[in-house]
Amino acid sequence: MNRDDLIKLLSLTDENQIEELFKKAYQIKQEFVGTKVYYRGIIEFSNYCVKDCYYCGIRKSNSSVDRFMMTKEEILEAAKWAYDEKFGSLVLQSGERIDREYIDFVTDIIKEIKKIGDGSLGITLSLGEQTEESYKKWFEAGAHRYLLRIETSNRELYQKLHPESHLFDERLNCLKTLKKLGFQTGTGVMIGLPEQTIEDLANDLIFFKEMDIDMIGMGPYVLHQETPLAKKVNRFDSRKQLLMGLKMIAVARVFLKDVNVASTTALQALDPLGREKGLQAGANIIMPNIGAVTYRKAYQLYDNKPCLDESAGICKTCFEGRVEVIGESVGYGEWGDSPHFKNRDKTKN
Ligand code: 5AD
Ligand code: FES
């Protein structure tokens, strides 16, 4: 498939043709990754952030956010719960911080989580741009996957979405470092950003391929009213955003085949059935929130975040139902690593 093919698929408007695309993507998913859905219990443990991205609700300049940091005990309690409930893996996510105290805190948490059930929980980190030294420390402590979205592969657009000090090349270098260190590496973009074109999205998919990425976590851009980017949007069309998000998942599956693709929360912010639709369009990973409900409201990257009041237990059971309804099952107790990582040539970065 070349760029034109990708553009053609992403441009589909005919309902039957879109349905065909989703079907094709689903077949490829069945063939290359199967129909087991893997849970990554996500713990959003802090919303302190040194970055000021124009689209994000917890950006440094948003003074109406109550800043919090979960304690070590609270994080470990959530991790222990995930283990008892047979989740294969966890994701630790927070706003970005690069100070020594934070780095050491995370290192300690990773080591402690690794002690639960004799290292049986897989750990994915989603903690932004860090130095090679910090990444290495965390890898050695036992984290084996890292998610760092490129947000958009279009440099000019990237710069419009971020203050001048946030550099595209820095993000790119971080991704390369993560791969070099041996992390299963995930990236992704926001879909349907102001000024983003279909060509940009096709280029994003080509970027994933060229970077030989193992995991994709991407979702529609969703407004957050207290951000500068929201002011640039005249009319926000949820249906359009959702559809483009689903088409990107489907085309990513058809194009990249054996990578893990997440059905992200942003889909559900736009449609109550958004995440099921994501699975049916080719995604195979779901990230239920397992942190305490107390902190959910303070961790809103965009408006309409779902499950604000649902405890981890409710979300788990709810998702189980959602997965079964579409004829799939949950891969309990398994890591569900990206087959692409196993297949790829690790001597090449
Ligand atoms: N809409 C959709 N996704 C967002 N993110 C941040 N703000 C928004 C928004 N308004 C995504 C970014 C980031 C991830 C943690 O959340 O892609 O990398
Ligand atoms: Fe959270 Fe349904 S997914 S309550």
Image: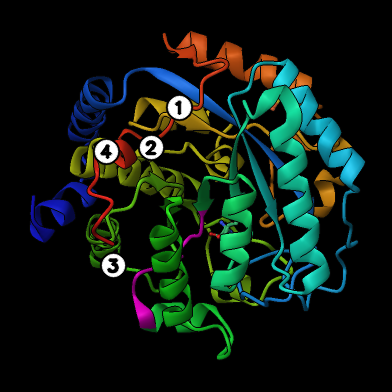
Colour mode of the rendering:
rainbow
Determine which quarter of the picture holds residue 54: bottom right
The quadrant of the picture showing ligand 1 is bottom right
Q: Is residue 273 visible?
A: yes
Which kind of residue does numbered mark 1 sit on?
A: Gly
Label 3 to label 1: alpha-carbon separation: 30 Å
Task: State which tag comes first along the sequence, 3 or 2.
Answer: 3
Q: Which residue is mark 3?
A: 200
Q: Residues within 10 Å of mark 3 (few under 14, many from 20)?
A: some
2 vs 1, front mark: 1
Magenta stretch bounds: 147-155
Q: Which residue is mark 2?
A: 260
Q: Which label belongs to residue 253?
A: 4
Q: Is residue 153 magenta?
A: yes
Q: Residue furthest bottom?
A: 164
Tell me: residue 15, above or below residue 43.
above
Residue 84 x, y percent position in the rendering: 74, 16
Residue 62 x, y percent position in the rendering: 79, 73
